[in-house]
Structures are given as structure tokens and as C-alpha cells.
Image (cartoon, helix red, strand yellow):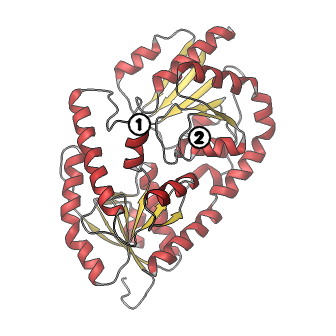
Amino acid sequence: RWNTVNRRRIGVVAHAVGGPGGQERSLEDLVLGAAGLGYDVRVLAYSVSAEVSVNAEVTLLKQPAGPFWVRFLMFWFVSTHQMKKYRAEGVPTLTCGGITRVAPNAIWLHFWHEDHLRRTGWVCSRNGSLLRMINQTLSRSLALVAERRVLRSRGIRVWVVSVDMVELVTRKYPPAKVHVVSNPVAAATSQDYWAPDTRRTAFVFIGGEWGRKGLVRVANALSAVAEARETGPFLLTILGPGDQKTLRKIRALPMLDIDHVPWTDRPTEWLRPAHAYVTASKYETFCMAGHEALALGLPVLTTPVHGLANAVASLDHGAVVGRSESELVHGVQAILDRQFEFQAQASRVRAAMHSLYGEKTLQQQREVALHDLAEC
């Protein structure tokens, strides 16, 4: 299948291409999109989806057991041999973050570890057992060191997932050439639409790392607003894994019912009848779930993070507030007070999200970035 004469060749290097996470789905979408545009694609990874294995030439590395930092170190060293083969054959290569010793031609920043540390001041969520904290600290510290090394490479291309990261990356690494290649927002190309439940007031929180994403702060704010309004308990649906200690804490809050769904591949089923998507995250580079909520026409309450905050503010469809519980309370109240306004403009927001993140726009972004990469 591999055409050595074809100059339209690229290599994609990542831990996983295809899978449950937004990053993995984005990488799969890129590989399939590149193949559809006529590129011969090589993939080096621990795991790939069935679709990727059919549409690309895949080299799988054996994944070791153990925490993420073990897998990261193993990939960092073992991928070197294959990356050198790509370089010798003149195959321009894109990596997902700084995950290999050999500098690639381009790096796709789904999560910018250096910016994360600068904005949050910590490398672990401080939520859970001591062993988990140690593992997370080791993982992110290694990723940070590796990322700095790769981004300082001469002539590096940087792909970012949100527009507001372009200036930051260019300022930090002036020689870098930056392209915006957004994550694929599935709901932006679907026929799903926002239809809030009229029987009760409901909110949705999506994602793991509940400490970083401020689940307890969100729950406290919702409880306070529900008590003040005296219209009955609010429903907070939590989609994603987390610890039972946190769940017990927020289940004890007054005027708040909790529905926890540890895993789903169809979040729109819970987003569609809600009154808002809520997050109090310390750091995001895009936030797939928040963008999918906007693509349905659902208003979003968020803190001022990359990607999502810019989308909410530019569309005026939700609220961007500080991370304190008092500010979150004001944000929840503002969203509830503007429900009729949000419903009236939901179709406009859906159309805008389709234009910004629909398949046509993503294909144009991919074409520009892939052409630049192939010319390396």
C-alpha cells in the first residue's frame, strides 16, 4: 500500500490513534481525512482503531503495563528507531505532543503542558490518593520536559486546536509556524438540537479530573442558586469517571440531585434536555464537550480558559466567569435569567458552530496544515 514515489506522504506518531478520548478521535479523524485527500499515511502508536489500520500503514509498539509515566518513557525511547527510519526516507512527521526523542517536523498541541503549569501552578490535580498524585506529577513533569525540548527544535511547525492559542505559541516560540487545526466537534455536523426539559432545571458536567475542572465548585454554586430560587431541586448530571468521596460530598448538598454516568459515547443524549453545560476548569486548550454543547444550541457556563471561553463570548451564548463560587453563582443565575433569549438564538448559534467546526471548515484547515507538513 505504501507508495514510495508519492511525495504526498506523512507520518503520524501518537500513543493512541482512535479511541474514546477527544484527542484520540481527533487523531483518527486526521489520519482518515489525510488518506481521503490522497496522502500515504504512516502511523506509529501503541494502539489504533480498525479504520486507521485499514487506511494507513501502521507500526504498533507493545504497550507496557503500569502508570502513564512508564508508558510515556517507553514510547519516548522505543519510538526513536522508527522515527529515524521516517527521517531517512524523507517522510515528514507529526507527533501528538512531545513524545519522541527524535524531533518531528510538526507537533499537535491538544494539551500544552507548559502553559498549563504557568496558568495553574501545579502538575497534579491533588485529588485522590497519594500514589495517584505521584503518578500524575511524574507523568506531567516528563511531558513538560519533553515538550520543551521538541518545541525548541529548529523549524518546528505547531498545530493548535483553538484560535486563541496562536498568539501565545508564536510569542513563546517566535520561529515556530503555527496552524489552527481544530478538534472535530461531532454535534456540529449532526441534526441534534437543544430541547430543554420543562419539568425540572438540569445541568450537565462532563469529564474526569474533577479537581481541575471544578466539579465541587460547580455543585456548590448550583445548590446555592436552587436554594435561593425555591423552585425545587436542580439536577446535575455528571458524565465521566471520578472518585466516590467527591460524589458523596456533592450528593449531600441541599436542593441538588446528582446523576452520575461513569462512561458514555453519546453525551448529546444528556446535553440536549439540559438548561446549560457547566464547567469551572482551571485549564483547557479546547474543551470538546463544551463545544459540542454549543453546537446543539445549549448555553455554556465556563471559566476563562482557552477555546471554550472565546467561543461562548463571541457567540454570547452563556457566561464566562471567574472560578470562585460567588462568581459561579452569578453565572448560573445569569444563564437561568436569559433562558428565553438563549432559546430564541439557539438556531443561530448552531449555524455558527456548524460554520466554524463543520466538516468543510475542518477539511480546509487540514488541507492547509497537511500541505505545509508534506513540503517539509
- Mark 1, residue position: 120
- Front one among 201 and 375: 375
Residue at image point 33% right, 68% down: 153
Image check: 282 left or right of 42?
Answer: right
Answer few, some or many: residues within 10 Å of disc 1's Cα (few below 14, many 20 plus, some between 14 and 19). Answer: few
- Mark 2, residue position: 268
Compared to 247, does 295 lie above or below? below
Image spot of residue 99 (x, y percent): 29, 59
Residue at image point 34% right, 36% down: 122
Image spot of residue 275 (x, y percent): 67, 29
- Image quarter where the N terminus lies is bottom left
Image spot of residue 284 (x, y percent): 48, 43
Please say whether residue 233 is visible from this viewpoint.
no
The image quarter in which residue 360 lies: bottom right
Could you tell me which secondary element the residue under label 1 belongs to? helix
- Residue type indicated by callout 1: Thr
Residue at image point 49% right, 34% down: 281
Please say whether residue 156 is visible from this viewpoint.
yes
Image spot of residue 13 (x, y percent): 34, 65
- Residue type indicated by callout 2: Thr
